[in-house]
Image (cartoon, rainbow, N blue to C red):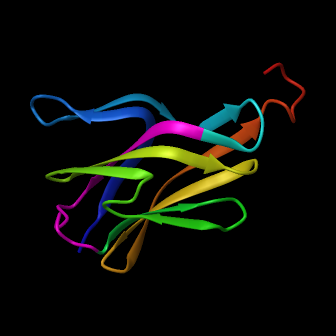
Amino acid sequence: MLTVEWAFLCEHAFLDRSHRPCLISITDRYAVPSMPFVIAHVGLAIKAGTPDPSSPALLLRFITPTGQRIDMGQGHPMAGLEIAGEYLLFHLRNLPLETEGVYRFMLLANGVEHPLTEVSVVSRASQGRPQ
């Protein structure tokens, strides 16, 4: 059974030449200019037990504050996935942020949900701050 040791949302996640995960600018919150907003690129790095890379049952679930769910598996236009041993590196593109609040990420492996991380999103416009 897959276990998740840690998961981090970051600007960029990649493996170095020695296959070690490298994470740049880890975050748990975004202050965006206004809502709605689209994050062009973000990385999600996960240290988990070794998954079966051919398993079609490996999905990343993105849950909005309103409860909308976006499931992204291999081949999904919003998500690229690298699997290297116990590391999963998701490269997310055009992530839609519709409203302020807490967005959650879950990993679904063989039908079992594994909570990963969450990110708080606030709009600078709603706080009266310059954009």
Identify the residue shown where x is 17% and y is 61%: 50
Q: Is residue 39 left or right of residue 23?
A: right
Residue 18: image quadrant is top left
As drawn, which residue projects farthest toward the bottom? Answer: 111
Residue 128 position (above or below residue 70): above
Q: Which residues are magenta?
A: 39-56
Residue 28 visible in rendering:
no
What residue is at 18 percent from the left and 35 percent from the top? 20
Q: Is residue 70 visible?
A: yes
Residue under the image location 57 percent in, 39 percent down: 39
For the view shown, which residue lies furthest in the right direction? 128
Which residue is farthest left?
Answer: 18
Residue at the spot x=31%, y=61% of the render? 74
Q: Does residue 4 sit above or below 130 in this rendering?
A: below
Residue 26 at x, y = what percent? 46, 32
On the image, the x and y values in percent for residue 27 come to 52, 35
The answer to which image quadrant residue 37 occupies is: top right
Q: Position of residue 94 (x, y in %)?
A: 53, 44
Say how many tags the image has: 0
Residue 19 in picture, x, y percent from top left: 13, 37
Q: Quadrant of residue 63?
A: bottom right
Compared to 1, does 118 lie above or below?
Answer: above
Q: Is residue 77 left or right of residue 88?
A: right
- Quadrant in which the N terminus appears: bottom left
Quarter of the picture holding the C terminus: top right
Say whether residue 48 is magenta. Answer: yes
